[in-house]
Image (cartoon, rainbow, N blue to C red):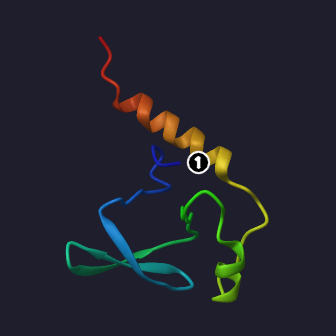
Amino acid sequence: MCTQGQAEGRSDSNPVEFTKDGVILNVAGKTQRIPNDFVWIFAGGEPPTAFLKKIGVGLGTQDLTSQGKQATKETEAELVPTR
């Protein structure tokens, strides 16, 4: 998905707010709003499902982990220089 321009990873940012159709990020002290369909939250070894539900975050019924892993492998393969 990342290689097809359908997803973008941002490790240089911190989320400020999630809206229905976007996310507001803090990037180097400046806020930036980008359109967004869904979010993967990586918060430790066990998903914080109860906490997320308590604060009103809707959780999808489809586990997209394997798709994310495949996209990561494809992206990493593109970054490895060929000889």
Amino acid carrying label 1: it is: Gly
Classify 47 as above or below 55: above
Report x, y in % for residue 38. 58, 69
Q: Residue furthest front?
A: 45
Image point (57%, 63%), residue name? 40
Image point (45%, 78%), residue name? 23
Q: Residue furthest top?
A: 83
Q: Residue furthest right?
A: 61
- Crowd class of label 1 (few under 14; some 14 to 19; many from 20; radius 10 Å): some
Report x, y in % for residue 19. 52, 86
Location of the C terminus (image quadrant): top left
- Of residues 6 and 24, the one drawn nearer to the viewer in this rendering: 24
Report x, y in % for residue 24. 39, 81
Q: Is residue 82 left or right of residue 28?
A: right
Classify 68 as above or below 24: above
Quadrant of the image occupied by residue 15: bottom left
Classify 76 as above or below 44: above
What number of labels is visible? 1
Q: Is residue 60 left or right of residue 70?
A: right
Image point (57%, 71%), residue name? 37
Report x, y in % for residue 5. 44, 52
Residue linked to disc 1: 68
Quadrant of the image occupied by residue 39: bottom right
Image point (70%, 73%), residue name? 49
- Under circle 1, the secondary element is helix
Q: Is residue 36 left or right of residue 16?
A: right
